[in-house]
Amino acid sequence: MDYLVLKWLHVLSSTILFGAGVGSAFHMFAATLRGQVDGVVGASRNVVLADWLLTTPSAIVQPVTGLWLVHMMGVPFATPWVAWSLWLYALAIACWLPVLWLQVRLRDLALAAERAGTPLTAAWQRLFLGWVALGAAAFVAFLLIFWLMVAKQVPWTT
């Protein structure tokens, strides 16, 4: 595959991955802050759907294209910016995988509250806080990866 096409796919998939994550977080936060259970149900349904349609495919494309690009460039995997990028990506995915489960659980709990005509439960609130914490960690990891991809240097080691 041509290097430019591969790089374009890598950048496009990173944009989708990051954008879907930020968009999902925004909608879940906005619905939660409004405090309307039906709004949380709608937002959480959309967040789960976005993860399956947008985030999951791009999360798979990212390492495939990234590793292929590194190979095509002849850059050793031990190069600091490559090694740190891979480590941070693994960290972000390790945060995201439980988020997938949390989002489904949050959706289901919100739906149950809506059907019962009750507010969101304390269990929902606890799961939401876990969702926020894991999402924030993944967000920071992705920001650092973007820096590494652009600068091709590790600023905290120089």
Image (cartoon, grey):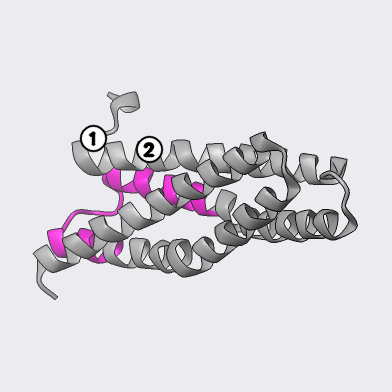
Residue 91 horizontal/vertical position (percent): 51, 47
Residue 90 horizontal/vertical position (percent): 48, 52
State yes or no: discs 1 and 2 in contact (Cβ < 8 Å): no
Query: What secondary structure characterizes most of the magenta part?
Result: helix
Q: Amino acid at mark 1?
A: Gln
Q: Is residue 145 in the magenta section?
A: no
Residue in front for this viewpoint, 17 or 109: 109
Give the distance between the C-alpha atoms of the residues marked 1 and 2, in whole angstroms. Answer: 14 Å
What residue would you read off at disc 1? 153
Q: Is residue 69 in the magenta section?
A: yes
Label 2: which secondary element: helix
Residue 134 can be seen in this image: no
Q: Residue 143 has which mark?
A: 2
- Which residue is at 43% across, 62% downward? 59
Q: Quadrant of residue 2?
A: bottom left
Residue 146 horizontal/vertical position (percent): 30, 41
Q: Quadrant of residue 22?
A: top left
Q: Quadrant of residue 41?
A: bottom right
- Which residue is at 33% across, 67% downward? 64
Q: In the shown orientation, is residue 33 left or right of residue 71?
A: right
Residue in front for this viewpoint, 36 or 1: 36
Q: In the shown orientation, is residue 51 left or right of residue 78?
A: right
Q: Earlier in the sequence, mark 1 or mark 2?
A: 2
Q: Amino acid at mark 2?
A: Leu
- Which residue is at 44% across, 40% downward? 141
Label 1: which secondary element: loop
The span shown in magenta is: 67-93
Residue 155 horizontal/vertical position (percent): 29, 26
- Which residue is at 54% across, 37% downward? 136
Is the N terminus in the top left, top right, bottom left or bottom right quadrant? Answer: bottom left
